[in-house]
Image (spheres, rainbow, N blue to C red):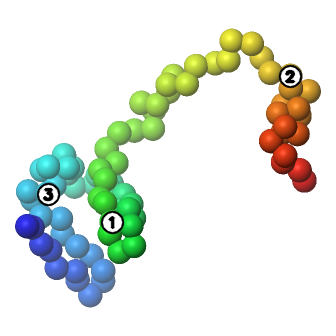
Amino acid sequence: MTTATITSKGQVTIPKDVRTRLGIDAGDRVEFIEIQDGVFQIVAVTQDVQVLKGIVSWPKKPVTIEEMNQAITDMGISD
């Protein structure tokens, strides 16, 4: 098990073996995701948002305002 110490400023140095396993270097970002009460997962945020471009295709047919309004009505959403 790898451990680290929290400084008085709330900072933690991520141990080298953990950085290596996460594939992160100085300047990279990590997210802390709570997976249950008091238990967090650290996830490396190493990809640029631009890599998501094109992942969702354009609709084959444009949706009309009437169709949007009907979908909203069908879902029971109101002002």
Q: Residues within 10 Å of mark 2 (few under 14, many from 20)?
A: few
Mark 3, residue position: 18
The Cα–Cα distance between marks 1 and 3, rounded to whole angstroms, is 15 Å
Residue at the extreme top of the image, as rendered: 60
Question: Quick check: 8 left or right of 56?
Answer: left
Q: Position of residue 64 (x, y in %)?
A: 86, 22
Q: Which residue is mark 2?
A: 64
Q: Quadrant of residue 13?
A: bottom left
Mark 2 or 1, nearer chain start: 1
Check disc 1 and give the amino acid type.
Answer: Phe
Is disc 3 placed on a helix, strand or loop? helix
Secondary structure beneath disc 1? strand
The answer to which of 52 and 2 lies nearer the viewer is 2
Density class for disc 3 (Cα within 10 Å; few <14, some 14-19, many ≥20) is few
The picture quadrant where one finds residue 12 is bottom left
Q: 19 or 76: nearer the eye? A: 76
The residue type indicated by label 3 comes to: Val
The location of residue 3, given as percent across then percent down, is 12, 72
Residue 33 appears in the picture as rendered: yes
Left or right of 29 in this view: 57: right
Task: Give the Cα separation between the discs numbered 2 and 3.
Answer: 51 Å
The answer to whether 57 appears left or right of 43 in the picture is: right
From this viewpoint, is residue 65 visible?
Answer: no
> As displayed, is residue 40 above or below residue 67?
below
Query: How far is the residue under mark 2 from the one under mark 1?
Result: 43 Å
Label number found at residue 40: 1
Considering depth in this image, is 36 or 50 the residue closer to the camera?
36
